[in-house]
Amino acid sequence: MNGKIQGIIVCGVIIGCLGGMLAFLNATGGADKKDESSSEVIKTESVDESVMLVEKDTIDIKSISAQNEYGGFTMERPASGKTEWNIAELTGLDQSTYAKSRIAENAAQIKAYRTVEQDAADLSKYGLDEPTGSFTIGYKDGTSRTFLIGDVSTKTRYRYLCEEGDDTVYMVLVSLISEFIEPVENLVDTTLIAQPPDSEMPDYGKLTLSRKDLDYDMVFEQDDSDSYYGVSAQVMTEPVFSYLNITGSSATTHGMWGLTAKSAVKLFPKEEDFAQYGLDDPIAEVTFVGEGYDYDLKIGGHTMKLNEDGNETADIDGYYCYLTGVDGVDCIWLIDAQNVPWATVMPGDVISMAVNISILNINSMTVTNGGEKAEYILDTDGESEIYSVKKNGADVDVSLFQDFYKYLLSCPTDEIYFEEIDGEPYLSIDIDFGDDGQVEELDFYTDSSRRTLVEINGRPSYRIPTSWTERFISNMENLDNGEKIIETY
């Protein structure tokens, strides 16, 4: 038998075997045969069970009233027409426009998530026999509808609800009815002092901070001089004169603008309320007076932050405050601690440098040390370049003098001092600057072997390490000798 015939026979045998196998599998429903039912995908569609309980336009509503464990409120359209809605219990206070709009819109379109039970025989299992709250919608046609609010449902985002006189129970999103079960204080506008637009920012007046834990006031005022390094346009004038570090001082100097509370705690407080919240004897008082404004903020007791277990931590959460000088804010407020820097701020937190004059604005600087006087004359363009520096008529290296002046700017200011100083200064620095020849005078007095008192423009201001003045004097010698200025002391 030749090879060609043999190949044909082998192929035929293989094909026959495969055909037999397929026939066997088809007959027996083998493992590779899929059950048609198993390949079907079961599709489920979520069924919308929502029910519209109220479907009106807000224009149809005349009033909305609520009753709850905190008392309740009545919101009506005022006859004056000055506002769309007024909450009677808050008349005289600034009311949250957003909250009132929400209440009206939610009352006009009440949509239940689903019906829980029709003709419920036992409303007590839903907390509707003694409801948490209720609200009544009064319409312009003289009709009204009242709804009862029960317990939190099995889905915690919802509450049980039914209409008065009807035993059908529904589930409604808590967010749609929250205002009806909360204190009326939550409907007060919590912006106490509006933030003026930059274009309408009033001139800075005078801010005075008095505190029980300090035996001095801190006073901040405007400084319009343009001869300084400092970017803050305000200065501290009491208990010492000092320039301000804007990074640390802006909350103190400008925190009254845009002041906002966390919540209103007590509406129209009486004498006993001030005592309850520590405002009869406040820990701090801030007055901010200028053209067109006169604010007075009293800061009383405080609340503590809570941890995950609901226990108090060591961190203050907010302060109870009372503000006058603004209409519509006659409440005791809880203000976030970070918005009340005046309760804890210290001078060292806000002040900048003892000397804050730009070197480009200096005409001359005179240093008197132990009876010896050195006068440095500067020639600058007042903007970006120093042409020359001369000491008592001799040229001084400009770059080294710049480093020397930088050391002067490093005079520490962390400890203020404002008691009268006796004796004579052992070191004096007088800086003549500006077009009108202003003079900044710094005098240094011995306090102890390690401490020195600094008087600025005749006013006691700081207590500093004597090592700073010792380094200043040795740096004068380095400047004379053309040697590097040392920054440490």
Image (spheres, rainbow, N blue to C red):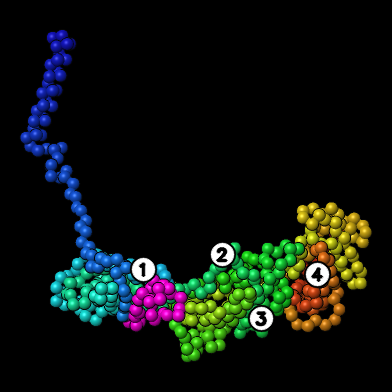
Callout 3, which amino acid? Asp
Q: Specify whether residue 252 is in view.
A: yes
10 Å neighbourhood of mark 4: few (<14), some, or many (≥20)? some
Which residue is nearer to you in this view: 406 or 183? 183
Q: Residue 265, image x and y in percent?
A: 44, 80
Dot 4: what SS? strand
Asked if residue 382 lies in the magenta stretch, the reply is no
Circle 1 is placed at which residue position? 102
Which residue is nearer to you in this view: 403 or 247? 247
Q: Specify whether residue 344 is in view.
A: no
Circle 3 is placed at which residue position? 217
Which residue is nearer to you in this view: 364 or 256? 256
Horizontal relation, residue 374 to residue 285: left or right: right
Q: Residue 488, image x and y in percent?
A: 75, 63
| Closer to viewer: mark 2 or mark 3 | 2
Horizontal relation, residue 117 to residue 70: left or right: left
Q: Earlier in the sequence, mark 1 or mark 2?
A: 1
Q: Residue 401, image x and y in percent?
A: 82, 58
Horizontal relation, residue 45 to residue 323: left or right: left
User: Label 1 vs label 2: CA separation?
Assistant: 27 Å
User: Label 4 vs label 3: CA separation?
Assistant: 24 Å
User: Label 2 vs label 3: CA separation?
Assistant: 30 Å
User: Label 1 vs label 4: CA separation?
Assistant: 59 Å
Marking on residue 440: 4
